Image (cartoon, rainbow, N blue to C red):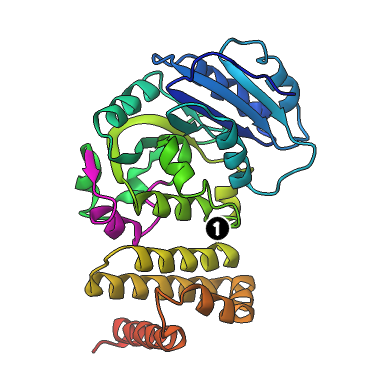
């Protein structure tokens, strides 16, 4: 089902890509419709949900803010394909991909639109998120994720703008610094210029999309918690824990970062050691991951061709350093 609008383009296009989140969906939509900033259109997408999501979405179909309501006839198999479908329908200057199990503070758009309007060079702005469980109980914040990135936790307690090809690159090489797309507002023309979201990946398409955005634009961060980031048993972020495919895709993203940004050699060496150490630690405790890692080792090496050309050698060097460290800690120097 599709609605079209002939009105003048709104400032923001809000895209809600839903799949089987009926229990969270009303809170998600009401938190969007209740925004203090109201110059937006709402694009509702459903990827062939098997719960009652479609009926709930249809109950919002006649709301004046709803510009598009689209139900897939087949499941697309990737959240990033849904992002791109919404992007193709969007008319706004900015895009907010509001995941269907999250929700937002009433001034989310007001605060982030102000940052984007004041800083034309910013391609993506995001805010601190509070993490919540399936019941809505607060269980932390994204400070936990970002505490070891950049200058440490202090960096994430104040607002800042980072140059895309300078400071942002040094942040991105450490990890995906935007752990939840619901916390971000993206300049639509910049997202279109990089070809939209990278839909070929299962887990790291968001990470690679942010990398490509920041190769050509700046990053803005608001230290105020304006987004609520849901952790549930249904979410992709839960399923990717210890996934060999997630780690392989991550190696491809790291390769892209090294190719597109100037990363100082000492920092790159630290990231390489952390990367291989993580793979080896997971392999030690997760037998299924270990066998998948071994089976797909040539794929890992190919994906990391720019990030670590001497992949096998670095893997063995890291293993040696870890074993020496373990021996020293147990028996002393």
Q: Report the front residue among 130 and 4.
A: 4
Q: Report the front residue among 134 and 207.
A: 207
Magenta highlight range: 160-178
Say if 67 sits above or below 274 in the image. Answer: above
Q: Position of residue 108 (x, y in %)?
A: 38, 24
Say if 208 sits above or below 104 in the image. Answer: below
Determine which quarter of the picture holds residue 70: top right
Work out whether residue 135 can be spotted: no
Say what secondary structure mark 1 lies in: loop
Q: Position of residue 68 (x, y in %)?
A: 64, 23
Q: Residue at x 43, y 30 (%)?
A: 94
Q: Report the front residue among 283 and 125.
A: 125
Q: Position of residue 228 (x, y in %)?
A: 45, 32
Q: Is 173 part of what is drawn in magenta?
A: yes
Q: Residue at x 29, y 72 (%)?
A: 268
- The residue carrying mark 1 is 241
Say if 68 sits above or below 74 in the image. Answer: above
Q: Is 250 part of what is drawn in magenta?
A: no
């Amino acid at each position: 089902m599709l609605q079209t609008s002939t009105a003048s383009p709104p400032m923001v296009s809000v895209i809600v890509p839903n799949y089987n989140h009926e229990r969270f969906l009303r809170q998600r939509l009401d938190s969007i419709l209740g925004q203090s900033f109201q110059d937006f259109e709402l694009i509702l997408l459903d990827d062939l949900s098997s719960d009652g999501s479609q009926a709930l979405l249809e109950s919002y179909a006649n709301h004046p803010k709803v510009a598009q309501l689209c139900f897939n006839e087949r499941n697309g198999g990737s959240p990033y394909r849904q992002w791109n479908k919404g992007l193709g329908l969007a008319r706004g200057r900015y895009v907010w991909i509001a995941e269907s199990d999250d929700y937002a503070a009433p001034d989310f758009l007001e605060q982030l639109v102000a940052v984007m309007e004041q800083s034309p060079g910013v391609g993506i702005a995001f805010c601190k998120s509070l993490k919540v469980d399936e019941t809505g109980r607060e269980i932390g914040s994204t400070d936990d994720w970002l505490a070891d990135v950049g200058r440490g936790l202090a960096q994430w307690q104040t607002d800042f703008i980072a140059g895309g090809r300078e400071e942002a690159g040094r942040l991105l090489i450490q990890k995906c610094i935007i752990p939840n797309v619901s916390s971000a507002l993206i300049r639509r023309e910049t997202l279109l210029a990089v070809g939209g979201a990278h839909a070929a990946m299962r887990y790291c398409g968001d990470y690679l999309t942010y990398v490509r955005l920041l190769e050509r634009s700046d990053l803005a961060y608001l230290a105020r918690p304006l987004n609520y980031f849901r952790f549930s048993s249904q979410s992709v972020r839960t399923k990717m824990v210890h996934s060999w495919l997630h780690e392989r895709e991550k190696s491809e993203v790291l390769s892209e970062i090294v190719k597109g940004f100037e990363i100082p050699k000492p920092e790159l060496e630290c990231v390489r050691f952390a990367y291989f150490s993580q793979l080896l630690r997971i392999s030690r405790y997760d037998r299924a991951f270990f066998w998948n890692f071994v089976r797909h080792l040539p794929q890992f090496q190919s994906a990391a061709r720019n990030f670590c050309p001497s992949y096998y050698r670095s893997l063995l060097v890291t293993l040696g350093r870890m074993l020496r460290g373990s021996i020293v800690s147990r028996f002393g120097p």
